[in-house]
Every structure is written in structure tokens, then in C-alpha cells.
Amino acid sequence: MTQTVRAAADESVDVRLTVNGTPAVVHVQPRVTLADTLREQLGLTGTHLGCEHGVCGMCTVLVDGEAARSCLLFAVQCEGADVVTVEGLGTPDAQHPLQQAFSHHHALQCGFCTPGFLMSAYDLLAHRTDVQPDELPEELSGVLCRCTGYRNIVAAVADVAAACPEGVPEPGNLGERTLVGRRAGDMTHHAPERSEQEASRAPERVAVPSGTPTTRVDVSARMTSPVEKVWDVLGDVERLAPCLPGAEVTEAIGEDRYRGRARVSLGPIRLVFNGVAQVIERDADRRLLHVVGQGADAGGSRTQADMRIVVYEADDGTTLHAEADLYLSGRIAQFGRALAGDVSRRMFEDFAAALDEAAATGSAPARRRAGLRLAVGAALAGIGGVVRRLALRVRSEVRRTS
């Protein structure tokens, strides 16, 4: 499992490992722990840190199929290792039996120790199919909890042990996906070792996001321009990029991949994302454009998007339709699903208007609505909706009591 690595104290080295089914390369100093690497460089914050002395067990993950305290392992020791964190156990829509049992028995309160218990319980049941209920308190004692009194935790694990006498099911959320770190530049690439100069020139791989998105957008807009003219713009990046609110392309890096940045503001939150987008499919017959992208800002916010845009002739003229799955984390995730969806829909409206202008004029749109104004407008609209709903509720209550 562990490797011997020789490196100076201030030297950084590349470490290759597989995390929840995704090959990753991290650039770390020898003193950086696996726990900090998972949280800071790979954005997997489900692994919690408590004592950082290997006592509390909250940072437990699986390393090559065995439970390990990630606060006691250096990342450089994990070269070639297969790591599974609590994020790999299951998804909100397809929970692992252990997650279902913890929810059913209310085996958590503050939830801070829960990832450690889930991974420790998985390790126990994967290696001991004959574990008895009276053995569980001792077997699970490697993880500390300050809330529950342990009884519900033991009951949850006992239920799964009884329901799975042949062994607990394997983690259900393993597969290749994009891992984006909490700081700009922490994106992991599925690529062989290269020099810094080579890496700066090389195109990043943009993986199609997986899992449950933060929000889904499904919107349409009527266009005044003919279908063919609109499709021409969708196929011309130089004219298409200026149509995107707050976004700009900084470099074409080949194979329909592009580096760029996007500015997003909402009230006091102002973010600048640097990232990569890739055209996965451009189908001229169906006039379908499929694009995926990923980006991160210096403050720890991360975005991923999987978007399909199609233009077609409807009874009442040209229609532009977009379906997008958006994945948000960090500060931008504080927007909430409703507000994130509202901002996205307004961005699409602005994009459609700019696209229509570019199709009509044959050049990039002359003016674009600023990202700041766009986001603030969405926020005000959302606040206005809340105020209107509260007013209606108050009037309804007054009528009921009068």
C-alpha cells in the first residue's frame, strides 16, 4: 500500500492514484497528508478531520480495500493506491445499504463522525460476514461520536450485517469523473507525467460530469433568424464565445477544447472562474451542440456543466432549446438550487438574444449584458418572488382570521 519516497522538505512531487474510480495526479509536498490532499486538491470534503492524531477515526477511508486513517498517511505514500472515500459509497438517488440504514435508524446527529463510521462499518462487514451484534460495539469503537450515544449506529450496522450475510455490497458510486480542487490550478488531469512547460501547452481532458447535479435547466427561446444562420454561429467559436454572458475564450487548445474564464457576481459574491470547455458532439444533421466544461476560482468555488443546445424550425419560427446539468460547490453553491436555476435561465435568455443578433448581423454581438448586472437582476427577481409569496400568505391569513 505505502511507498518509499525520497524528496526534500520543500520539494513537490507528482503522485498517481485512483480515487473513487477516477485516475488522478496530485502535485504535493512530502509532508501533506492523504486527508488534506483529498479535501484540498481533489475537493472530496466528505472525509472529515477531527484529532489529526489517528485517534478519532473520522478521517477513515479505504486504501487498497483496507480501512486507513487518512490523517496518518502521507499522500506520497499512496503512489498507485486505490482510494475510496465516503463520496464513492453511494449517491443521494442510489444510497449504499449502510447509508440507508444510518438514515433509517437516525444514526447521526451533527454528522461529523458519520463518514468515518460508514467507511469503518463497510470495512468491517466486507471482511467479516460472521460478525455478531454483541461484537459491534467493540468492532466500531475505532470511531468516536459525541452526539448519538452509539446505540443507533450499532443498530444500523447490525441491520446491514443481517441483511447481507454473504457480504456487504461494493461501493456504488465509483467511476471516472472530473475532480476539481478547492484552489485554482488544482484540477487533476488523467495524463502521463510531463514537464511544467509541456503541461502548460497540453490540452486538459474534460470529463462528462456524473452524479446528481446541483440544478437542471431545460429552457427554450424563440429566434428571429433562420435556423441555418443560428446554426452557423453555433459552429463558429469566434462568434459564439462573445454571446456567452460574462465569459471569454482565452485559448484554443485543439480537438475542440478551449480555455477561458467566466465572471459571476451575486450581491457581495464575485467570482472569476478559469477553466476548460470541450465540444463533445456537433451534429449538423440534428443541429445539436453538446458541450461540457469545468472551472474553479481562487476562493474554492467549482463548477461543472454538461449542456446540449439544439436549434430547429417550429410552427412559429426558429426555436433554440437547451438542457443543462450544473454541478456547483464552494461559495457558489450557497446560491441554492432555485437561485442557481434562475441565474442559469436568465443567462440563457441573454445568450439567446446575443446569438440571434450574431446570426442576423453575421458578426459577434456589439454589446453584451454584464455578468454582474445579470446576476444581481436574478437575485432581485428571486427576492421579489419571496416577498410576493409572503404578502400572499399574510393576506390569506388575515382573511382566514377576520
Image (spheres, rainbow, N blue to C red):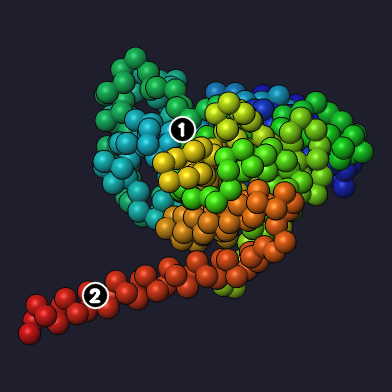
Q: Position of residue 54 (x, y in %)?
A: 58, 43
Q: Which residue is mark 1?
A: 89
**Residue displayed at 37% across by 70% down:** 385
**Which is nearer the N-term, disc 1 or disc 2?**
1
* Numbered label tally: 2
Q: Position of residue 246 (x, y in %)?
A: 67, 59
Question: Is residue 340 in view?
Answer: no
Amino acid beneath label 2? Leu
On screen, residue 211 versus residue 101, left or right, reads right
**Residue displayed at 56% across by 66% down:** 375
For this orientation, the residue located farthest to the top is: 166
**Residue displayed at 26% across by 24% down:** 162
**2 lies above or below 108:** above
Q: Position of residue 139 (x, y in %)?
A: 40, 32
Q: Which quadrant of the figure has residue 193?
A: top right
Q: Position of residue 95 (x, y in %)?
A: 37, 34
Do residues under tags 1 and 2 come within 8 Å of each other at their CB atoms?
no
**Separation of residues labelled 1 and 2 (CA atoms):** 44 Å
Amino acid beneath label 1? Leu
For this orientation, the residue located farthest to the bottom is: 402
**Residue displayed at 49% across by 50% down:** 222
**354 lies above or below 266:** above
On screen, residue 125 versus residue 275, left or right, reads left
> Which numbered marker is on residue 392?
2
Q: Secondary structure at mark 2?
A: helix
Q: Secondary structure at mark 1?
A: loop
**153 lies above or below 83:** below
> Which numbered marker is on residue 402?
none
Q: Residues within 10 Å of mark 1 (few under 14, many from 20)?
A: many
Question: Is residue 284 in view?
Answer: yes
Quadrant placement of the C terminus: bottom left
Label 1 or label 2, whichever lies nearer to me, is: 2
